[in-house]
Image (spheres, rainbow, N blue to C red):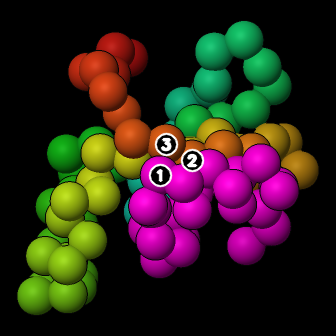
């Protein structure tokens, strides 16, 4: 995973495990990020179901992080990661 220094610092500050970022990029729903040529990955209802079905009991260990999102540049570099603090609108 290619991650900017900013993203690494924010991930550590916000207590988001690296495995959650990997899950976001593998299973998350992608949408254009507002105001930039980037993509935002987040866990929608289908992604949450798929993770639970695929990983079983292990999914319960990351369930508290399923409100996270990641912003990724066009080059595939993770720019930032954070917790959603408001309901996503599509």
Seen from the viewer's position, the closer of residues 46 and 63 is 63
Residue 28 in the image: above or below residue 41: below
Q: Residues within 10 Å of mark 3 (few under 14, many from 20)?
A: some
Disc 2 versus disc 1: nearer the observer: 1
The disc label shown at residue 81, or none? 2
- In space, the residues marked 3 and 2 are separated at their CA atoms by 4 Å
Q: Is residue 74 left or right of residue 23?
A: right
Q: Choose the circle earlier in sequence order: 2 or 1.
A: 1
Residue under pointer 3: 82
Q: Are marks 3 and 2 in contact (CB under 8 Å)?
A: yes
| First to last magenta residue range | 1-22
Judged by its main secondary structure, the magenta piece is helix
- Which image quarter is the N terminus in? bottom right
- In space, the residues marked 1 and 3 are separated at their CA atoms by 7 Å
Residue 80 in the magenta stretch? The answer is no
Residue under pointer 1: 14
Q: Are marks 2 and 1 in contact (CB under 8 Å)?
A: yes
Disc 1 versus disc 3: nearer the observer: 1
Kindly state the secondary structure of the residue where label 2 is placed. Answer: strand
Q: Which residue is painted at 13% across and 85% down in the image?
A: 56
């Amino acid at each position: 995973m290619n991650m900017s220094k900013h993203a690494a610092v924010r991930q550590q500050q916000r207590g988001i495990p690296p495995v959650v970022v990997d899950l976001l990029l593998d299973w998350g729903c992608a949408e254009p990020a507002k105001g930039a040529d980037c993509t935002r990955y987040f866990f929608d209802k289908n992604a949450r179901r798929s993770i639970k079905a695929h990983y079983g009991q292990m999914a319960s260990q990351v369930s508290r992080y399923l409100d996270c999102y990641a912003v990724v540049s066009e080059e595939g570099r993770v720019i930032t990661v954070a917790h959603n603090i408001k309901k996503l609108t599509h």
